[in-house]
Amino acid sequence: MQEHDMSWVRTEMALAQPAPPTERGAYAWVRKNLIGSVGDTILTVLGIAIVLWVLPQVINWAFINAQWIGPNRTVCATVAQGGIQPDGWSGACWAFVNAKFGQFMFGTYPVEERWRPILVAVLLVALLVPMLIPRVPRKGLNAILLFLVLPVVSFFLLSGGAFGLPVVETSRWGGLLVTLSLSFVGIAVSLPLGTVLALGRRSKMPIVKLLCVIFIETVRGIPLITVLFFASVMLPLFLPAGVTFDKFLRALIGVSLFAAAYMAEVVRGGLQAIPKGQYEGADSLGLGYWQKMGLIVLPQALKLVIPAIVNTFIGMFKDTSLVLIISIFDLLGVVKQNLSDANWATPQTAKSGLIFAAFVFWLFCFGMSRYSMYTERRLDTGYKR
Amino acid sequence: MASQEILREEPSRGSFVNDPKIRSIFFQTLVIVLLFGSVWWIVQNVIDNLARLHIASGFGFLRGRAGFDISDTPIAYTSDSTYGRAILVGLINTIIVAVAGVITATIIGFVIGIGRLSNNWLIRKICTVYVEIFRNIPPLLVIFFWYSGVLAVLPPPRESFHLPFGSFLNQRGFYFPRAIWGDGSWLIGVAFLVALAMAWFVAYRARQRQMATGQQFPVFWTSVALIVGLPVLAFLLAGMPLTFDLPKQSTFNLTGGFQVKPEFLSLYLALSCYTAAFIAEIVRAGIRGVSKGQTEAAGALGLRSGPILRLVVVPQAMRIVIPPMTSQYLNLTKNSSLAIAIGYPDLTATAGTVLNQTGQAVEGVFIMMIAYLVLSLVTSAVMNVVNARMALVER
């Protein structure tokens, strides 16, 4: 009986109490993330020391001491070096980038014709942006315009020779124009070619398979420079006497073949991840080989490997800088070429020019990688098992 | 019997056009004919072109006099040496920079990769910034940055930076004391080898004993004592046969010592920094790929945090890490061909010079391709052996 009297049953829920002050707010965050243990504290102190040592120097160099506008090297050189800056001055020479900006973008493309690359860039942006935004409709038409119509239009616009436009030799193309056109064509060619190679590698026909394996493994085993050498020195030997074709085109072929081999391996990974049931299902529906691949397998396989495809694109975008070895001047090549301009020779010039080029490359690559992460999240529709 | 025979036959396709076997044979024959046709066409063109340009063919040119100088020569080489030797020098230079780069990139990559998983917010962010910067710019740009942006603007030899241990840094490179081994120094090498063998033996016996009796033996410290102790002992016994050739500052230059040229230095630093960013991501993915249950189960078995990491987490992470790491090593080796842009005489640079001098493009490109393919295959083979030892042993 007494037990009954002493028992007590809670009739309403206890109110939630706020976390103790040591577990919330800025202090708890700092304690958890910065000074969790002795080792952590030492690391934090080290980290702060590194940041305090590097950051002010970088900001000083890149912004506070930097020279933005100037006619020649004097604004970026100290008195001892024949300039106007006080001794011991060290800052970025953005004036150099500013003065050479046109060249960095277009190379030696004639100044009065530069509206043509600009127009191509505007067209590219106008077609690319709706392509990248998932909500915009008519993706099929958009893709045809972007990957089939735009290259042709751009070719005529850039090289001229038709519609009353004066001819501009590809040897005068340069800068970001070359970087972007090489990588755009590389992307547009390498994905379909790589897909065909991947299908060939998984083909049941032994000879087709063998040829694809030999091509993929050879190209993947040698550096891009060797491929470019091959394209620039050997291709002319392969053709009958008198037939020559443009150096820029040869570089394009080299870059595209190189990227296609890597793309093939990426696509093969996707093909292997598709369960056998999908192939068998397509077979039992009576679909032929190309119907089976085009309608059932490839859409699923490519979707699975989008991040890896974008990684290959990023790699190719970076690799286009190597064409300067066979003296085609892309963005990096033009910057490098201008570093030897006596009019701008100061100790700061090289650093400033290269950091500018790095920044442009970084923007494109970082943009691509972020977009691929976004797509990955969007398409993540329960394929994870 | 007869009915079974009939059942086993392929169903009739109506027309042989639809028979997959015949179609497959037809397509493959077509491919072979096209391939041989184009190869024959190309070979004919090449023969015509070479005859027209009066270029010899065959590998006889390798025995010709090179006539050009190479700045970094790990083996004896003068301009009187043969073309073949020039290419060999290039190959050795490629291997040197690749091996040095692989080791450094692995160390930096592991540090950064583990840093990205740290509990410490600041360290995590610093490592993320490093990875995001280096992953997104071309390796050639990194090389140029080190070469023209950093090393070329160092002070001239007269105002060299003095670094510890009698080494110097200036725009002509990095100078450090060269060790000169005297008589009897072979004893040290022998002692080192003996120590290695003994350490292996100790580890083997300790393992056997632990399997049999459960008793542990401090293998690590014994091995360290053996590997450090025996060579030191040999060094003392041989009468300390070691002197140093210190770099000395004269009016215009540094003399003596060992000079690392800025070309090598910038290539090596750039490749290490660049590849380290990729290795860091691989290491991070590898460690995160080991499920938390593994750590907890090991804890439940009574292991402490050190052995958990060493015996449970790292071996499983290595399984995920090694295959992509192999391809990064291959990438580094291939990227070392960028040396040509700053004038470090690697394989591509020397073979390219030979190719230009002799005009024998076909043979030159062929040698380059074969050399890189062999390097890639050797690296893959070594890493496959490592991978096989790490791989999961299933039933």
Image (spheres, coloured by chain):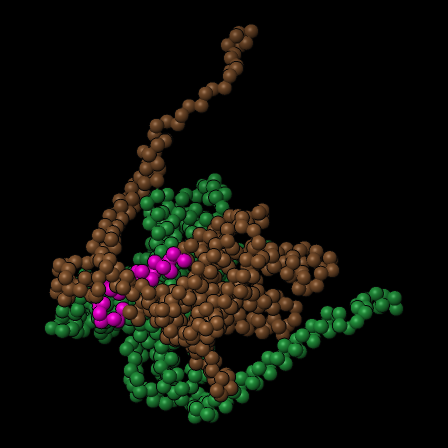
Chain colours: A brown, B green
Q: Main secondary structure of the magenta part?
A: helix
Q: Is residue B81 magenta?
A: no
Instruction: Please provide percent x and percent y for residue B196.
Output: 36, 64
* In the image: residue A113, left or right of residue A143: left
Instruction: Please provide percent x and percent y for residue B50.
Output: 46, 89
Q: Residue at x 32, y 57 (%)?
A: B224
Q: Nearer the viewer, residue B221 or A308?
A: A308
Instruction: Please provide percent x and percent y for residue A171.
Output: 39, 75
Residue A259 can be seen, yes or no: no
Give the magenta range.
Answer: A339-364
Image quarter hosting the N terminus of chain B: bottom right
Residue A382 can be seen, yes or no: yes
Quadrant of the rendered structure where residue B28 is? Answer: bottom right
Image quarter hosting the C terminus of chain B: bottom right
Q: Is residue B24 above or below residue B326?
A: below
* In the image: residue A283, left or right of residue B225: right
Q: Residue at x 60, y 68 (%)?
A: A200
Q: Nearer the viewer, residue A186 or B34?
A: A186
Q: Is residue B138 above or below residue A233?
A: above
Q: Is residue A359 magenta?
A: yes
